[in-house]
Image (spheres, grey):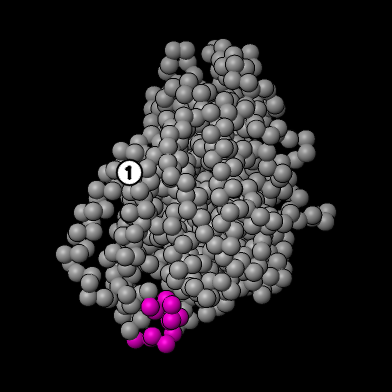
């Protein structure tokens, strides 16, 4: 094989194209990851770093899996060390707490079954208690871009591993913002699904009723690919629930805070300016924008640590802490022990629950059909500054994140430019638990991911445009081509799906094709790729009738693009026309 020119950032699309063309194999990728982990050893990213012996069984298992059929085949990922990986110690960043699990956490097992490779266990704030990334006996995790600054936590190593090119994606956890703050501080996407949408079986609990497993990635496409493999009900997990992700869509309106957010830290002014630029960018999307009072979110957030939920942390870890106080970092011990305070009474718990329920109802009304945008963080700190004010600095970092799980919201943190040289800025989009698809739609517009530099030079997508895959009446020469043209779209290139789709002829007037992804089997279907202005996608999507919608379509070369997909229920009674290879080849439409 020719010498590989490795990008600093690894993405699933870049790897899959090279795997499928034979230009690269997973063994080479793992060798490069091990080299990079050794290079960055002083950054304290790993507790159990990548090593050939522990990764070898996963590499060998790939030989029995067809890379065309497994969407995450050969894709390396990091695992936060409060999530079980069979055969590797789970420490939760406390050596005395360590145990050796005999099975993978449910979410890890699902990703491995999809072909992904866990490469190591990443560093974290001890017992997932913190948003700064410096509370670990394994060392303070350095920011990926500016090492003198905090990485964010508690999923510190998970984020920095991805940002430093030592994994394509990583698993974190999120109780108060741990899956979003590190994303913002390291220039990543941080996707936090709805509570219970991904199983938490095999995860060391922080607050069991609020905990989520999350994903960090360089782009939304990769995060959603992980979501497709990880999502689903787990009957063995008492916190699991069925939360189906609908095809990506756009909200009826975008919500922005009525009062300017507060900013803090040594770059407060630069953060304020970055926020103003982000507001301008979201207003330019062409969606209705409404200013709203965000008091309910800050009031809900105050319940997390000032209220009885801190007692839930103590309920899960109190017995260990009481027996091993010397093993727990002083700041962590202080926070956990506060959960045993006499003020946390049963009556106080119910009072807080009733108060929170009112906030939940207010949030349901406010966010119905809408997406809220807030800064992910209002500032950042140098690590030495956090050492001087560990509790106050940590509290600041959760100012715009703590409310999320208490209110049963879904969220995605996305990059939004820079604050200063090498310091990224990020915003978070929030939606109701059953409206995650709106996050995917708005996030894709904001990121305009199809202009990713990993796309080959002859596949350049113009700035402000998004790739749209069409497989039926919107193709050239068919009746709805005019809708594409009316929305400023232009034909780009022909393509084919990965061989895991079924094409059906829907019983509509006129008949339409429906593209459905299959867990097993299926075929490759011809389609067209068009470029459409990002600003036009919302009005175009509003014209698409059920059961069709916009979602992610995997192409034969490994790319994932926005495209027409069909709800599964519509397959009942529809004619399977996959064998024709595409709508254009059907004898009679």
Q: Residue at x 34, y 59 (%)?
A: 302
Place of residue 132 in the rendered image (x, y in percent of width and height, measured from the top left): 51, 67
Q: Could you classify mark 1 by the number of other residues whose Cα lies within 10 Å: few (under 14), some (14-19), or many (20 or more)?
A: some
Q: Residue at x 61, y 44 (%)?
A: 68
Place of residue 555 in the rendered image (x, y in percent of width and height, measured from the top left): 62, 37
Report the residue that reaches farthest toward the left: 347
Relative to the observer, which residue lies in front, 167 or 473? 167
Place of residue 572 in the rendered image (x, y in percent of width and height, measured from the top left): 38, 27
Is 266 on the left-hand or right-hand side of 101?
A: right
Relative to the observer, which residue lies in front, 301 or 8? 301
Is 236 on the left-hand or right-hand side of 33?
A: left
Q: Residue at x 42, y 87 (%)?
A: 326
Is 435 on the left-hand or right-hand side of 416?
A: left
Residue 111 visible (yes or no): no
Quadrant of the image occupied by residue 527: top right
Q: Secondary structure at mark 1?
A: helix
Is 82 on the left-hand or right-hand side of 317?
A: right
Quadrant of the image occupied by residue 40: bottom right
Q: Is residue 557 above or below residue 421?
A: above
Assign the magenta stretch its main secondary structure.
Answer: helix
- The residue carrying mark 1 is 363
Place of residue 101 in the rendered image (x, y in percent of width and height, measured from the top left): 44, 72
Report the residue that reaches farthest toward the right: 2
In what quadrant of the picture does the N terminus appear? bottom right
Q: Residue at x 57, y 65 (%)?
A: 381
- The range drawn in magenta is 323-334
Residue 9 visible (yes or no): yes
Whether residue 153 appears in magenta in the rendering, the answer is no
Relative to the observer, which residue lies in front, 484 or 390? 390
Relative to the observer, which residue lies in front, 20 or 159? 159
């Amino acid at each position: 094989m020719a010498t590989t020119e490795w990008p600093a950032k690894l993405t699933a699309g870049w790897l899959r194209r090279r795997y499928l063309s034979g230009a690269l194999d997973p063994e080479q990728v793992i060798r490069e990851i091990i080299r990079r982990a050794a290079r960055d050893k002083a950054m304290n990213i790993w507790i159990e770093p990548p090593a050939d012996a522990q990764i070898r069984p996963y590499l060998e298992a790939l030989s029995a899996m067809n890379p065309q059929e497994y969407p995450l085949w050969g894709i390396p990922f990091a695992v936060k060390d409060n999530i079980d990986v069979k055969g590797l110690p789970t420490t939760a960043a406390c050596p005395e707490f360590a145990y050796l699990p005999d099975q993978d956490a449910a979410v890890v097992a699902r990703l491995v079954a999809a072909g992904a490779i866990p490469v190591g266990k990443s560093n974290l704030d001890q017992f997932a208690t913190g948003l700064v990334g410096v509370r670990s006996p394994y060392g303070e995790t350095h920011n990926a871009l500016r090492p003198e600054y905090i990485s964010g936590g508690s999923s510190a190593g998970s984020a920095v591993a991805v940002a430093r090119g030592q994994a394509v994606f990583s698993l974190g956890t999120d109780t108060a913002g741990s899956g979003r703050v590190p994303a913002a501080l390291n220039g990543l996407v941080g996707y936090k699904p709805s509570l219970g949408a991904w199983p938490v079986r095999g995860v060391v609990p922080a607050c069991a009723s609020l905990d989520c497993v999350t994903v960090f990635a360089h782009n939304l496409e990769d995060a959603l690919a992980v979501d497709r493999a990880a999502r689903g009900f787990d009957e063995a997990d008492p916190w699991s629930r069925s939360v189906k992700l609908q095809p990506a869509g756009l909200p009826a309106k975008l919500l922005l805070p009525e009062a300017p957010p507060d900013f803090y830290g040594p770059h407060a002014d630069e953060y304020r300016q970055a926020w103003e630029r982000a507001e301008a960018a979201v207003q330019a999307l062409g969606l209705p924008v409404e200013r709203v009072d965000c008091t309910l979110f800050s009031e809900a957030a105050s319940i997390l640590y000032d209220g009885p939920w801190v007692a839930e942390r103590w309920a899960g870890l109190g017995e260990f802490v009481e027996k091993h106080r010397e093993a727990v970092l002083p700041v962590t011990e202080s926070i956990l022990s506060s959960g045993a305070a006499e003020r946390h009474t049963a009556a106080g718990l119910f009072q807080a629950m009733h108060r929170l329920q009112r906030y939940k109802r207010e949030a349901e009304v406010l966010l119905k059909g809408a997406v809220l945008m807030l800064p992910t963080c209002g500032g950042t700190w140098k690590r030495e500054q956090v050492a001087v004010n560990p509790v106050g600095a940590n509290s600041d970092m959760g100012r715009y994140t703590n409310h999320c799980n208490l209110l049963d919201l879904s969220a995605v943190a996305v990059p939004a430019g820079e604050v200063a040289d090498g310091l990224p800025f990020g915003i978070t989009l929030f939606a109701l638990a059953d409206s995650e698809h709106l996050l995917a739609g708005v996030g894709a517009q904001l990121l305009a991911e199809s202009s990713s530099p990993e796309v080959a030079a002859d596949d350049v997508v113009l700035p402000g445009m998004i790739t749209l895959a069409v497989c039926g009446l919107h193709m050239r020469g068919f009746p709805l081509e005019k809708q594409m043209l009316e929305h400023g779209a232009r034909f780009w290139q022909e393509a084919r799906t990965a061989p895991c789709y079924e094409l059906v002829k829907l019983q509509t007037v006129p008949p339409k094709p429906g593209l459905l992804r299959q867990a097993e089997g299926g075929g490759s279907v011809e389609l067209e790729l068009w470029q459409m202005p990002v600003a036009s996608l919302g009005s175009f999507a509003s014209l698409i009738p059920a059961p069709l919608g916009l979602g992610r379509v995997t192409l034969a070369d490994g790319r994932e693009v926005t495209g027409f997909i069909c709800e599964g229920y519509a397959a009942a009674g529809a004619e399977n026309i996959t064998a024709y290879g595409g709508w254009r080849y059907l004898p009679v439409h």
